Image (cartoon, rainbow, N blue to C red):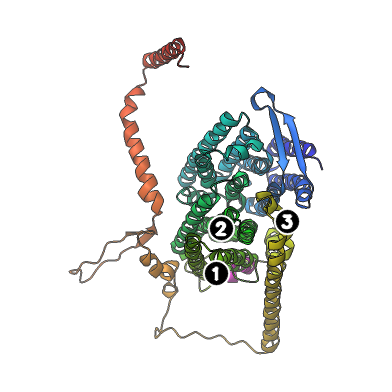
């Protein structure tokens, strides 16, 4: 399939969505929207897969006097991200069919939602394939605006509006940085084509331009301290949108960072160490906040930040390996980053979809009000458990493979004879181990509090969950997670082709030959673990199948009349951790202490939440200072038409004088 056909077909899908969706019956909008996404994914996956298999795809067309020649080029890096985008968006749209049923009476809102979803999907594909700075920015802006519409679906709620505005402002700060960087390169090289970027990066001021790129793309990815939009936008969006945003939209930031790494030729070690250190901090900060929060969608949002840090660690160590000529280190680091990008899009989508089922059942995001849901929604609980094991890096799921590769790259980095690199890699290895342990703690808390125990509040009677077509995206993701876990060697061949793009001069056959047996042994070990677990389960079922089950109360620590309030809560589970890192995750309490003279104290209520460190101590204070400064100029907006005319006259006179004196 040629790129010309792909472009025309994708544009036709978007046009068809705008033309057809508003006039369909409400109950068919979600189905048709899903079919359009599926058609677009099928059309664009064919050339992407062909490129990963060794073919090339490039197409240049004339974009008028403003854009000039516009190049579309799909290389293995673009193809990898396009396939991830297609897979995640198809699963998200499939889940969205059932999730959006309660909103079918909102005719206009539902139509706009699915039109935005199709545009969002197409724009991300454009970001991956356009190789022209201005057109890239146009696709990036369409992606931002369409995702904003998706986030603000429930726009009648003030928190959703605030989250949307916060997201829009921060995304445009990123766009401003990217625009400055592309204009800087175009001014120096005379072209917006990506092919001129390598020659520009060989100049002395290239480091500053890469810093602009890193800030612009880093805001989208969610690196600290550029992450503060993410914990607000993910909980505000519908769950299928949260899954897609966490699965792929933050990965567009990762794609941009990797795309610029392709063009780097100098300062690799310095930039790699910078990315590595920022990524360790990002991973630790993300999982620490995830551990203490009790809003399960906000918790999953902070876990996205953690996993972005893990991907960044792979990029950092890979870039260092490229800079010092250690091909084994480079191959392992980049492989871990690329594979973890795919893995995170799978299990994070699964977790958000499961969270959506929990929300539709309970209509609350506060896990402290839940409990015992495994009895009502067992398949959702099973999916959440599998996603929890995968995100914690436990076998036999896919997360174990990418984290194992990352640990291996850090071990190889320690072997290099460089004291500075040894220190950095040892610190990163310790940080990754701590993050892994805290991830297990976080999801043990989340799964236990939400699905186990007894209900903490009285729930409406519901029929027990049964397998239905709505579970199709769950099973697709679970199957892929297991396939990557038990057969990771199959995914390494396309990854090798992508790394060849990152460093065309490196001989990768030797590193690949050395890693292939290791990766294969991981798959065999995961398969044996699955078979052993299945055998033990079948044996247990056979032995206990004929035994009559007896139920009795457990020992209650001496309490004769326990109640549901005596169960562990999310706060009690991580209270010690929150106190240990109280400086970072400061707790805000709404509670009046009992005085020493209150012999018969009255009833009291207690409420607490954890403030976001960067938002509270940096962003809020900075924004308050800006607002305070701007308040000094409110006299300009005095409502007098004569004054506004005068402002226009003064502006025109300034332009005339500037032209006379050749200032403009």
Count residues near mark 2 (Cα–Cα under 10 Å), then give few for <14, some for 14-19, many for 20+: many
> Mark 3 highlights which residue?
494
Q: Is residue 417 left or right of residue 255?
A: left
- Residue at 39%, 86% in the rendered image: 558
Which one is earlier in the sequence, the residue at label 3 or at label 2? 2
Q: Is residue 350 left or right of residue 580?
A: right
Circle number at residue 451: 1
Asked whether residue 461 appears in the rendered view, the answer is no
- Residue at 50%, 73% in the rendered image: 454
Which one is earlier in the sequence, the residue at label 1 or at label 2? 2
Q: In the rendered image of this protein, does residue 466 appear above or below residue 239?
A: below
Nearest the viewer among 239 and 212 is 212
Dot 1: element: helix
Over which residues does the magenta segment extend?
372-385
Query: Based on the displayed image, in which of its 4 quarters is residue 550 positioned?
Result: bottom right
Which mark is in front, 3 or 1?
3
Q: CA distance from mark 1 to mark 2?
A: 38 Å
**Any magenta on residue 559?**
no
Nearest the viewer among 600 and 77 is 77
**Any magenta on residue 383?**
yes
Count residues near mark 1 (Cα–Cα under 10 Å), then give few for <14, some for 14-19, many for 20+: many
Asked whether residue 78 appears in the rendered view, the answer is yes
Nearest the viewer among 659 and 205 is 205
> Mark 2 highlights which residue?
317
């Amino acid at each position: 399939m040629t790129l010309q056909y792909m472009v025309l077909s994708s544009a036709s899908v978007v046009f068809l969505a705008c033309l057809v969706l508003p006039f369909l019956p409400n109950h068919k909008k979600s189905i048709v929207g899903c079919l359009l996404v599926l058609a677009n994914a099928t059309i664009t996956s064919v050339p992407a897969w062909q490129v990963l298999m060794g073919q090339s795809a490039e197409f240049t067309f004339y974009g008028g006097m403003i854009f000039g020649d516009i190049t579309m080029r799909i290389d293995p890096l673009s193809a990898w991200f396009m396939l991830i985008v297609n897979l995640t968006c198809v699963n998200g749209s499939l889940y969205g069919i059932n999730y959006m049923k309660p909103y079918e009476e909102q005719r206009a809102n539902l139509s706009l939602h699915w039109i935005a979803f199709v545009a969002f999907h197409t724009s991300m594909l454009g970001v991956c394939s356009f190789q022209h700075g201005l057109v890239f920015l146009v696709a990036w802006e369409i992606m931002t605006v369409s995702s904003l519409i998706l986030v603000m679906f429930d726009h009648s709620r003030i928190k959703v509006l605030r989250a949307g505005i916060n997201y829009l402002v921060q995304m445009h700060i990123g766009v401003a940085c990217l625009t400055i960087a592309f204009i800087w390169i175009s001014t120096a090289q005379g072209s917006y084509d990506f092919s001129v970027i390598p020659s520009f990066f060989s100049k002395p001021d290239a480091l500053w331009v890469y810093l602009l790129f890193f800030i612009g793309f880093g805001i989208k990815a969610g690196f600290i301290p550029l992450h503060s939009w993410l914990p607000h936008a993910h909980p505000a969006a519908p769950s299928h949108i949260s899954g897609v945003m966490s699965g792929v939209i933050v990965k567009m930031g990762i794609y941009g960072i990797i795309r610029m790494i392709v063009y780097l030729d100098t300062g690799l070690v310095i930039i790699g160490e910078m990315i590595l250190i920022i990524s360790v901090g990002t991973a630790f900060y993300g999982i620490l906040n995830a551990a203490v929060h009790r809003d399960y969608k906000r918790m999953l949002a902070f876990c996205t930040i953690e996993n972005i840090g893990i991907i960044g660690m792979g990029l950092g160590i890979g870039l260092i390996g490229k800079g010092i000529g250690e091909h084994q280190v480079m191959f392992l680091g980049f492989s871990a980053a690329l594979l973890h990008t795919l893995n995170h899009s799978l299990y994070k989508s699964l977790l958000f979809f499961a969270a959506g089922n929990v929300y539709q059942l309970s209509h609350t995001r506060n896990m402290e009000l839940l409990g015992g849901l495994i009895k009502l929604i067992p398949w959702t609980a099973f999916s959440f458990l599998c996603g929890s094991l995968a995100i914690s890096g436990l076998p036999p799921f896919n997360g174990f493979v990418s984290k194992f590769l990352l640990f291996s790259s850090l071990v190889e980095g320690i072997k290099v004879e460089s004291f500075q690199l040894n220190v950095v890699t040892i610190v990163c290895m310790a940080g990754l181990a701590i993050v892994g342990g805290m991830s297990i703690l976080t999801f043990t808390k989340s799964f236990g509090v939400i699905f186990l125990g007894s209900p903490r509040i009285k729930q409406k009677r519901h029929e027990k969950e049964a397998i239905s077509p709505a579970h199709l995206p769950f099973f697709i993701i679970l199957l892929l997670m297991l396939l990557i876990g038990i057969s990771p060697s199959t995914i390494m061949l396309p990854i090798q082709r992508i790394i060849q793009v990152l460093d065309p001069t490196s001989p990768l056959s030797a590193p690949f030959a050395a890693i292939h047996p290791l990766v294969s042994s991981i798959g065999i070990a995961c398969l044996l673990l699955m078979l052993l677990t299945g055998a033990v389960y079948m044996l247990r079922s056979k032995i206990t199948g004929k035994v009559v089950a007896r139920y009795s109360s457990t020992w209650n620590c001496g309490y004769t009349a326990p109640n549901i309030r005596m169960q562990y809560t999310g706060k009690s589970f991580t209270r010690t951790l929150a106190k240990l890192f109280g400086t970072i995750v400061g707790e805000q309490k709404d509670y009046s202490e009992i005085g020493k003279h209150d012999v018969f104290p009255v009833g009291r209520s207690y409420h607490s939440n954890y403030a976001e460190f960067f938002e509270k101590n940096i962003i809020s204070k900075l924004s308050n200072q800006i607002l305070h400064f701007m308040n000094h100029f409110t006299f300009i907006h005095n409502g007098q038409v004569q004054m506004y005319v005068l402002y226009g006259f003064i502006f025109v006179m300034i332009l005339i004088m500037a032209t006379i004196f050749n200032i403009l």
